[in-house]
Amino acid sequence: MKPTVRFAPSPTGRLHIGNIRTAVLNYLLARRAGGTFILRLDDTDRERSTDAFAEGIRTDLRWLGFEWQREERQSDRMARYAEAAEELKSKGRLYPCYETEDELDRKRKRQLGRGMPPIYDRAGLKLTDADKAKLEAEGRRPHWRFRLDNTSAESGLAPLPTIVSWNDLIRGDQTVDIGSLSDPVLIREDGTPLYTFTSVVDDIDFAITHIVRGEDHVTNSGVQISIFEALGAVPPALAHHSLLIGADGHALSKRLGTLSIETFRSDGLEPMAILSHAALVGTSDAIEPHAKLEELAALFDLGKISTAPGRFDVEELKSLNAKLLHKTAYEAVAERLQGMGISGGAAFWDAVRGNITLVGDARDWWTVVYAEIDPVIENIDLTTKAAGLLPPEPWDATTWGALTAKVSAETGLKGRALFHPLRLALTGREAGPELKALLPLIGRSRAETRLLGKRG
C-alpha cells in the first residue's frame, strides 16, 4: 500500500524549523514510495487562526518546494465532527460534564492533598437527567469527555486493560497507561471540537496510513488509539520523532520566532539547505547539502532517525547553505543574480561561489571586480613593478600564474610576501576567491590602476 500522510499545522502563526522537520519527514516518506501528501490546516481555534497565517503556511511550503495532492481545512468539517460525536455518544463513550475550570482545579488540589493522582473523577457519568437539567437551567453548558477504556471494578463496570501499546516506527515498542489519565475533553462548552478528536476523525476519513509527528504526542497517541477503536477504525502506523534542541542543548520552543521559515527566506538562505538540515538532523546520515528533494527521498528511512534530540544550530545551517552554493551551477541562480544587478555571467559566479554563504554575498564580490575600490597598498615597489609587467589582453586562467612568476623573478619575492600585497592592491581584501579566476574579470585597465595605488 502506498503511504498517505498529512502535515497538519495550525494557522495561528508562521512555520518554523520544528514544523518543517515534521513536514519534510512526512513528505519524504510519501515521495519515496509514490504516496500522497495532504496539507491539513487545523484551524478550529477561531480566535487565533487567520487566513493570513494559512496563506503564509502555503507560501512557506511552496517556497521550500513542497507539493501536496490535497488540502483540507478543519473549519470546513464541523458537521462531520458533530456526526462522529453523536456516534460516540450513542456508544456511551462521550459524556457531558459541567464543572468550571475553578471547580476542576479545586478537585485536583484536593486529590493531590490526599496523595491521589489528579485525574478526573468521572462525576459527569453519575449525573441524572434531572441533575443535567438543573445545571443547564443555571446557565451551565457541558463540555464533553471521552470515556477511556480504563474502568475498574469499583466503577460497577467490568475491569478492562489500561495499557495501550503499539510498535512505533521510530521508537520501537511503546505503551501508555491510560489508567493514569483523565478522560480527555473532546468538545468544549462552546461546541468547538478539540484536536485530539478532530485529528482522529480526519485521519479515518482521509485514509491516513502513517502518522509521523513529534515525541510530545506519545501520550496523546495512547488516547487517540482508543478513539480510533471506539469509532471502529484501525489506527495508522505511528512514528514519533525526537524534538529539536539548540546548539546550547536547550529547547528551541522559546526562540522559534527567530527560526521561522519566513525569517530564513528573508535572510537569504536556500530552501534546499533548510530541507537538507531538517531531513538529516538527528539521523545516522551525515548532514550534507542536497540539491533536490529526490536525493533526500532516496536516503529517507524512518529507521535512521535517532530517539535522541536533534541538535539545531543556525550557524551549521549557514555553513550548509554555503556548501550548497559552492556546488550550485550558474543556471540555478542566474535570474536572482540578474535581479540584483549582478552581471558577469557564469565566469563571475564560478569565480566567487566558493567564497559566499548567501547568494546576496555575490554582490560584494561583484563590487570588488567591477566597481571602483580603494586599493590597499602594502608594498608600493612590488605593486608598481607588477603594474609594469601586466601582459596585454585577452586574459584567462593562466594569466595570474604567468604574472606572478615574472614579478617573483624580478623582485626575488615569494610566498606571502609576493601574493599578499598583490591581493590587497587588486581587491582591497585580505582573502577571497582565487585571483587566477578574478584577474581576467577585473581586466587590465582596473588592475593597472589599482596596482599603482589609485582608486579604480
Image (cartoon, rainbow, N blue to C red):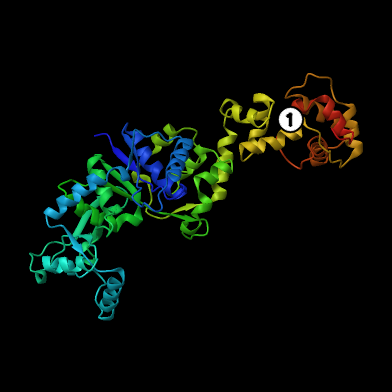
State left or right for residue 157 relative to residue 415.
left
Vertical relation: 153 (above or below) 335: below
Place residue 403 in its image quadrant. top right
Foreground of the two, 342 or 365: 342
Residue type (three-letter) at the residue carrying disc 1: Leu
Disc 1 crowd rating (10 Å Cα; few below 14, some 14-19, many 20+) is many
**Residue of label 1:** 438
Q: From this viewpoint, which residue is outermost toward the bottom?
A: 114
Q: Nearer the viewer, residue 147 or 273?
A: 147
The percent coordinates of residue 332 (x first, y second) are 56, 28
Please name the residue shown 14% across and 47% down the image: 232
- Name the residue rendered at 73%, 29% in the picture: 436
Quarter of the rendering occupied by the N terminus: top left
Q: Secondary structure at mark 1?
A: helix
Give coordinates of residue 256: x percent, y percent: 49, 54
- Quarter occupied by residue 237: top left
Pick the quarter of the image with the C terminus: top right
Left or right? Give the position of 253 relative to 423.
left
**Quick check: 51 left or right of 172?**
right
- Would residue 247 be seen by someone viewing this image from the given angle? yes
Residue 261's x, y, as percent? 50, 45
User: Would residue 201 appear left or right of 417 to someone viewing this image?
Assistant: left
Residue 285 seen: no
Kindly identify the residue that appears in the image at 40 percent across and 37 percent down: 299
Residue 283, image x, y percentages? 41, 47
Res 446 → quadrant: top right
Residue 25 or 147: which is nearer the viewer? 147
Classify 390 as above or below 412. above
